[in-house]
Image (cartoon, grey):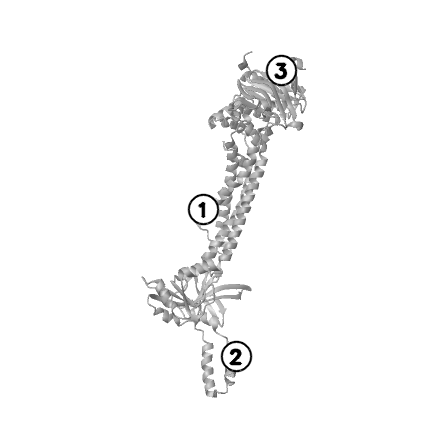
């Protein structure tokens, strides 16, 4: 398979916290690939290492061993690759969706999306136009000027998704995006992510422990005790 | 997008209240500076009003303000005869405290020769003193009305005019009377005291066996005339003729026994540095303490505000925000808070300084320096918040 066809490539990734006798292996020998347009889940119970895997792929946590390749760029190979601007990579290549939406409380819905664009050096007018377009496409056109405190949980999470999509990233990483939502809103968010993965041709990697939300994923990696123990197609998952 | 402004806009109630609190504190700092300048202005007010070149006082004293000084009034004639002297005028000073409308009423009384100088620098209402006796010009701050009478010593004095805001070095408002009246108020004894003194002198002379009764009576008359004389003043102020050499005139007066010529510059130094030095140091210390307190408060506000925004900062870092965006947000908020607080404090003092019991003088240079200090404090104080913010890991944005 052509290496560049993957948006995410992780090979034998290991993350060890601490040293010596107190060392804890959070993730060991994890290998996975995600293609653009794919919606992939990392499923596992609390403490299984799935968030550690996400933070290593999200360029937040430095892997102890193994390689991480994002959109054809090797960012980690036995530690961070020298010369890689991690912030820039996060800005340009990655989008993040959080469990508790993490919208900036003192910015309106529109400004929350605009900030991601302005950080990436887009002019204010362009950012405003793009944010309006994105939020409108997510049925939030009437909520542009609302602060997060005035939004429902589902609306806030859709604003967060719009922010993650703002810079048209190749990879979107979602950490328990449905955990704070009821089942119906959770399913709506998952459906939206599936649609966006296809439409934007982005690789979406979702960490979840919620078995109710596994429908619709193209592939599911089952994690337990820091290891990927299984890989299933969504059809097998249920 | 300016995150600092957005945050302030969202939390405007908290920001405004914090700025007002800080503004009140800075208002106290500003007023301390104003009181200090006011002390100097008050201390020098009489000096500036007189426009004298030399103050002739009792030898070995720093009178008439810093120390007691008593010299004979008739020295004025000798001073006028000194080459280079254009005018010489005797002045008498005394602080008076009486009861008025059931309350203590304190003022500083200056007696001046009506044909000389050293009288009221201006008349803002009524007229100046025209009669040699029983007329008074009062500073507006005394709150007296024209035509009102005040009893001092043995007589009543009528307010005939009001002068501007002139105070003594202690901050007491100044009133003016003729020199003769001032001397009477200060030295004239009442009739009982005079009779008592005469009896005492007579008894003492009677005990001297070598004096005949006629000699005794003659001596008693002369001694009483001396002890009852009121022709004493505290200083003689001298103005030089154009082109006269100050040092030469001072040297000439210094050669006489019993007198000390103090130049205007020396008198200014005695008043500004000597008399109010402790008050100045005390105020300076208070200002420093208050500025340190302000710095600690600003630091705490910025630090706690940063702690409130840990998740926001982590999220910004996670989405790839540059450090300058985060530093800018904290620094701008700190500077804006200091800026607003400074002007709240300044505005507050501008609106209230006339109601202060002592004079407040706001010098533009002092205000500019304070502004720079406040801004510097804000920058330094924001470092604690910035340090905390830079330590925040982007991973802290993850989780519930």
Whether residue A78 is visible to the viewer of this picture, yes or no, is yes
Q: Residue B136: image x %, image y %?
A: 44, 66
Label number found at residue B196: 2
User: What residue does disc 1 label?
Assistant: B368
Q: Is mark 2 on a helix, strand or loop?
A: helix
**A38 to B120, vertically: above or below:** above
Q: Distance between the residues labelled 3 and 1?
A: 67 Å
Tell me which residue sits at (47%, 44%) in the image. Answer: B372
Tell me which residue sits at (50%, 66%) in the image. Answer: B96
User: What residue does disc 3 label?
Assistant: A219
Q: How far apart are marks 3 and 2 (CA)?
A: 122 Å
Are the residues under marks 2 and 1 on the same chain? yes
Judge depth for marks 2 and 1 and give the one in front: 1
Q: How far apart are marks 2 and 1 (CA)?
A: 63 Å
Which of pointers 2 and 1 lies earlier in the amino acid sequence? 2
Q: Nearer the viewer, residue B64 or A128?
A: B64
**B4 to A31, vertically: above or below:** below
Q: Nearer the viewer, residue A192 or B149?
A: A192
Tell me which residue sits at (57%, 32%) in the image. Answer: B392
Whether residue B128 is visible to the viewer of this picture, yes or no, is no
Q: Is residue A197 left or right of residue B158?
A: right
The residue marked by circle 1 belongs to what chain?
A: B
Q: Which residue lies furthest to the top in this view?
A: A1
Count residues near mark 1 (Cα–Cα under 10 Å), then give few for <14, some for 14-19, many for 20+.
Answer: few
Q: What element carries label 1?
A: helix
Judge depth for marks 3 and 2 and give the one in front: 3
Count residues near mark 3 (Cα–Cα under 10 Å), then give few for <14, some for 14-19, many for 20+.
Answer: many
Count residues near mark 2 (Cα–Cα under 10 Å), then give few for <14, some for 14-19, many for 20+.
Answer: few
Q: Is mark 3 on a helix, strand or loop?
A: strand
Are the residues under marks 3 and 1 on the same chain? no
Q: Residue A189: image x %, image y %?
A: 61, 21
């Amino acid at each position: 398979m052509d290496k560049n066809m993957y948006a995410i490539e992780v090979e034998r990734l290991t993350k060890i916290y601490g040293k010596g006798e107190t060392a804890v292996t959070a993730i060991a020998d994890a290998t996975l690939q995600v293609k653009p347009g794919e919606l992939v889940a990392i499923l596992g119970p609390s403490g299984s290492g799935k968030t550690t895997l996400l933070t290593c792929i999200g360029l937040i946590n430095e892997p102890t061993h193994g390689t991480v390749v994002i959109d054809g760029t090797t960012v980690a190979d036995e530690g961070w690759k020298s010369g890689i601007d991690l912030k820039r990579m996060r800005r340009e290549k990655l989008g993040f969706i959080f469990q508790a939406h993490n919208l900036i409380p003192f910015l309106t819905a529109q400004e929350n999306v605009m900030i991601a664009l302005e950080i990436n050096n887009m002019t204010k007018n362009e950012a405003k136009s793009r944010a309006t377009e994105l939020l409108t496409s997510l049925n939030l056109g009437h909520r542009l000027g609302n602060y997060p405190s005035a939004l429902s949980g589902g609306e806030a999470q859709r604003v967060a998704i719009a922010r993650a999509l703002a810079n048209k990233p190749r990879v979107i990483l979602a950490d328990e995006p449905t955990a704070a939502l009821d089942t119906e809103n959770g399913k709506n968010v998952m459906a939206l992510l599936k649609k966006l993965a296809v439409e934007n041709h982005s690789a979406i990697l979702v960490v979840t422990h919620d078995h109710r939300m596994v429908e619709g994923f193209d592939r599911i990696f089952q994690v337990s005790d820091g290891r990927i123990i299984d890989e299933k197609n969504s059809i097998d998952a249920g | 997008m300016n995150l600092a402004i957005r945050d302030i806009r969202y939390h405007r109630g908290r920001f405004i209240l914090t700025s007002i609190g800080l503004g009140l504190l800075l208002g106290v700092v500003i007023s301390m500076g104003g009181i200090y300048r006011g002390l100097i202005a008050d201390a020098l007010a009489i000096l500036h009003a007189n426009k004298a070149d030399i103050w002739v006082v009792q030898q070995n004293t720093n009178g008439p303000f810093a120390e007691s000084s008593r010299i004979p009034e008739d020295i004025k004639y000798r001073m006028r005869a000194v080459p280079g002297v254009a005018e010489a005028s005797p002045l008498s000073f005394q602080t008076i405290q009486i009861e008025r409308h059931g309350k203590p009423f304190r003022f500083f009384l200056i007696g001046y020769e009506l044909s000389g100088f050293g009288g009221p620098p201006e008349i803002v209402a009524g007229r100046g003193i025209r009669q040699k006796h029983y007329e008074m010009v009062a500073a507006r701050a005394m709150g007296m009305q024209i035509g009102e009478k005040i009893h001092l010593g043995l007589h009543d004095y009528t307010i005939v005019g009001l002068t501007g805001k002139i105070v003594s070095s202690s901050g007491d408002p100044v009133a003016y009377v003729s020199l003769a009246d001032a001397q009477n108020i200060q030295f004239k004894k009442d009739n009982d005291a005079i009779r008592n003194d005469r009896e005492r002198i007579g008894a003492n002379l009677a005990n001297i066996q070598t004096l005949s009764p006629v000699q005794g009576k003659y001596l008693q008359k002369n001694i009483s005339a001396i002890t009852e004389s009121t022709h004493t003043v505290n200083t003689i102020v001298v103005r030089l003729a154009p082109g006269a050499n100050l040092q030469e005139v001072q040297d000439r007066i210094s050669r006489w026994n019993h007198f000390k010529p103090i130049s205007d510059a020396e008198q200014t130094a005695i008043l500004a540095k000597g008399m109010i030095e402790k008050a100045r140091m005390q105020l300076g210390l208070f200002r420093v303490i208050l500025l340190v307190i302000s710095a600690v408060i600003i630091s705490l506000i910025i630090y706690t505000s940063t702690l409130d925004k840990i998740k926001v900062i982590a999220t910004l870092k996670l989405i790839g925000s540059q450090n300058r965006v985060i530093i800018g947000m904290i620094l701008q908020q700190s500077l804006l808070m200091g800026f607003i607080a400074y002007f709240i404090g300044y505005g507050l003092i501008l609106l209230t300084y006339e109601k202060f019991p002592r004079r407040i003088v706001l010098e533009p240079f002092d205000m500019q320096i304070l502004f720079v200090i406040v801004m510097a404090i804000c920058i330094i104080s924001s470092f604690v918040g910035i340090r905390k913010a830079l330590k925040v890991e982007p991973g802290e944005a993850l989780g519930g």
